[in-house]
Image (cartoon, grey):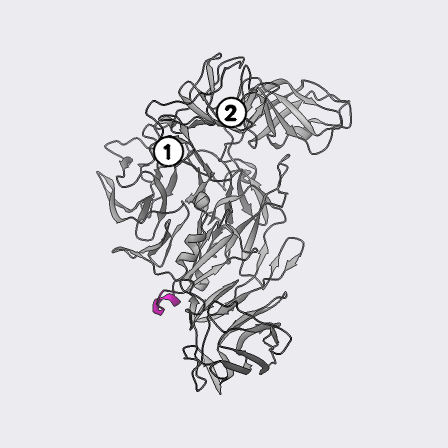
Amino acid sequence: MLAKVQLIPGFDKQVTETGAEGRWTGGDYVRFRYGLPEKIGGWEQLGTTSLVGVARDQHAWFDLSGNRYAAIGTDKILYVYYEGTFFDIHPLETSRQQAGMTSCFTTSAASDAVTVTCTTQHALTAGDLVVFSSVSLIPGTSSFVAADFEKTFEVQTTPTNTTFTITMAANETGTPFSTTGTATLDFYYVVGPALQLPGYGWGSGQYSGSVTATTTTMNNGGNLLVGATSVTLTSSASFPATGTLFIGTELMTYTGNDTATGVISGLGRGAGATTDAEHTDGATVTNATDYVGWGSASSFGIIIDPGQWRLTNFGQKLLALIFDSVAVEWDPSAGDALTTRATLITGAPTASRDMLVSTSDRHLCFFGTETTIGTTSTQDDMFVRFSDQEDINTYTPTAINTAGTQRLADGSKIIGTLRGRNGNYVWTDTAMFSMRFIGAPFTFGFEQVGTNCGLISQHAALEVDGIIYWMSEDSFFYFDGSAVKKLPCLVEDYVFDSLNNDAELIVYAGVNDRFNEITWFYPSGSATTCDRSVTYNTRDSQNIPGGVWITNDASLLKRTTWVDQGVFGAPYATSYDTSETPTQGSISGVGAGATTYYAQETGTDQVKSGGATTAVAATIESGDFDIDQTGNVTGAGEFMCRISRFIPDFKNQVGDAEVSIMLRDFPSDTRASSASGPIITGPFTITTSTTQVNCRARGRAASFKIANTGTGQTWRFGTFRADIHAGGRR
């Protein structure tokens, strides 16, 4: 008899595939709309180039003339996207500029490597970005000319504290030269590491205990300055290639050891809650790589945050905060704005964890910031500072302004913030606070509205229709204005059991308003960038127990940032590929790993610059269903079932789709399907004219799968109807 298999929308991964009878169990590149599954839309690359680094935040806005912009902050560079082109507006650390360097370049025959000699210590590490200008006195016998140097370079190595190497776009084919040329050297503000890294805390050994460790002395040719990232030792032969060291009371990590020169490079200063300080030449240096005791370095419990951005706008101005660093501004209306770099916000703190422009009252607020502006050592992870109203340059409270400060109580550090429709919200690692403008004399009132509901990452919270949703370290939550509540989730174990907690700070949430979806992109397993996503449907979930949730593990949809369609008419998202080489701009020496910018929900496929098209191969699978003696799909698995035909039910189908029937006799069996042999279960190709499909399928439990494999294909599935008969108890 013909039976109808009714399925509740959303995936159920909390139970077994047999236990999920009447539900869907998984898939990729699909969504539910009005209760029915369908393939998601495709995406198309924006612009013709890929960006340096992995994108950590994105923001879209209009200027006063109606021009549309998007800012993208990677772990290397701050970009602006305008009318199909990317512009590097990254701020320069002007206080470090070395103007009028002389005898600064050395080349080698048949090599693209150049050694740069600085006037003073550079405090660089491999991977930092520098830019040269006003280059002159390059010998005419060299194949290089001054213009070849007047660009941005990634630092390759730092042999000494006054030299570093760069890579040119081509080899020296002329006569090499040594310590020749003049230039002005500028430094990009460092955003931070591309990855979340383990740091160093305090050991648990015997009180005042110690471990015998190798020591030497500094032979630096001068003191080791604050911020310097390399140091020369009298001998580094007994130090490992990478590790940690002590100088004075400061613990430092390092990534390079040139035993021939004694140069230790890639210093991470002030590790393990110690303080970056100046050290006298000749000071004792201790190898602390394996040095564990009470008060000594241990690699447990401390995390080095990845490089992050917070991007927003104040009027038409772009405001950008580098995590644990400075805040800058960029005005699109300024003359030659697209070729002008962002500059420091005058008067603003110089080290903060997060930033927002408060709702309606327009204060610029900094979180996890300095108690004394301009003194980074006073940064307090729970401290809040806000500007005068409508004035982003004034932070000193007076009797006639609304600037002020506050310190939150619950938690150890502020994780993130959100500007909402009805107020502002702040999360620590353990709690949630509302932040509302109340006027003089306090300006803002802070109310703790939730506990044990901390935010997993800076960008893991968002608002939809006045309700705040976020992801914590082990659950999803929402706040409807009255109370914090846990969001029911039928894929919770699947998400959090696979989540890479060592990279959780890069989780990013985005809204797709057209389809009433919230998506969290997260890293799984050992991944160090987002490779999976989980989506919640805010509209369809209202009447569905457990909500409508979708997971996606497919390789094409790895997004690191997302903005909704408000400015550009379609969601814009970034994707990072470790195998691609960036092509944007004239940055020399960068290695593999690039960000691609996409417009989402366009067409049916992935379309890269130049027209290269890849099929978005969607798939979705049902839970098992059993039959009773009469053939109804409400059995307990006592009877075998025979399926002799099924009737496809597709809407908005373009191209072909595929249907497979999967069978097993017991829940512990592996689902089986075959395209040949005595049992024909598919996949069966369904065209737009297919009315029914004859088949021969027999098993105690059956499920079905909908898929497509080719380009230009899309579909929306309705109801599975099949001719099902009871086939005995064996």
> Distance between the Cα atoms at labels 1 and 2?
32 Å
Residue 617, position as x, y percentages in the image? 58, 63
Q: Is residue 4 above or below residue 272?
A: below
Residue 530, position as x, y percentages in the image? 50, 49
Q: Which mark is residue 487?
A: none
Q: Which mark is residue 229?
A: 2
Q: Which residue is mark 1?
A: 393
Q: Is residue 475 visible?
A: yes
Q: How many marks?
A: 2
Q: Is residue 275 above or below residue 345?
A: above
**Magenta span covers which residues?**
540-547
Residue 378, position as x, y percentages in the image? 34, 28
Locate residue 405: give its quadrant.
top left
Considering every residue shown, the one lying at the far front of the view is 730
Residue 3, position as x, y percentages in the image? 47, 83
440 lies left or right of 729: left
